[in-house]
Image: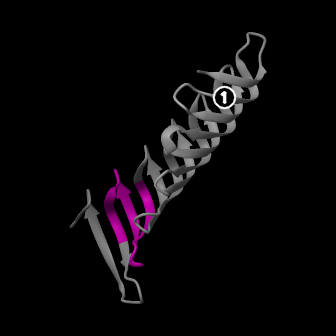
Amino acid sequence: EECYVGEQNSTNQRHGRGIMAYPNGCRYVGCFINDKRHGYGKCWYPNGLGIYTGYWKDNKKHGRGTMRYANGDVYEGEWMGDRPNGTGTLTMTEKGELYSGDFLNHEKHGRGMYKFKNGDVYEGGWKEDVRHGNGLYMFAKNRGTCREMYYNGVPV
């Protein structure tokens, strides 16, 4: 059952600060404009899927925000249209790895740095979630560096 406590506009729409419980188990605390999540807020997703804290626009994650996923992964950065878009950092807790750089539609895309569990680091171009273009691979424990060129994830 849907339940809302908070401010409303003259047409009884959620408008201003409020708390919303959705039938699917999702809970939201934050700002609304004309019945939509808009502005700063925090959302707890059902079944332990995760918690998002940050900015919203027209019911979608938009602007700076942090998503803490149930598996322990954390994305902190820019959002647009409910997806990571722009600059951000994804910490992959289970894998022990980290990516910091550009995202497009939830994929690594543009320039970024990927730190592997063993301490190796790749810094360079990405396209549709795979290495693409020029990059520099730095081996852990001062074992040297290697310049690399990729095309759609394949070394060339």
Residue 148, image x, y percentages: 30, 72
Residue 77 as seen in the image, left or right of residue 136: right
Range drawn in magenta: 109-135
As drawn, the residue found furthest toward the bottom would be: 142
What is the tally of numbered marks visible in this picture? Answer: 1
Q: Quadrant of the N terminus?
A: top right
Residue 74, relative to residue 104: is it above or below?
below
Residue 46 as seen in the image, left or right of residue 13: left
What secondary structure is the magenta-colored segment mainly? strand
Residue 98, relative to residue 8: is it above or below?
below
- Identify the element where label 1 is drawn: strand
Rendering colour mode: one colour
Residue 135, image x, y percentages: 36, 69
At 55% across and 32% down in the image, what residue appears?
25
Residue 124 falls within the magenta-colored stretch: yes
Nearest the camera: 78 or 151? 78
Q: Tell me the residue that label 1 is attached to.
A: 20
Residue 140, relative to residue 84: is it above or below?
below
Nearest the camera: 121 or 29? 29
Residue 144 as seen in the image, left or right of residue 84: left
Q: Quadrant of the C terminus?
A: bottom left
Q: Quadrant of residue 31?
A: top right
> What kind of residue is marked 1?
Met
Residue 30, image x, y percentages: 71, 35
Label 1: few (<14), some or many (≥20) within 10 Å? some
Residue 141, image x, y percentages: 42, 88
At 52% across and 37% down in the image, what residue appears?
46
As drawn, the residue found furthest toward the top would be: 11
Residue 62, relative to residue 91: is it above or below?
above
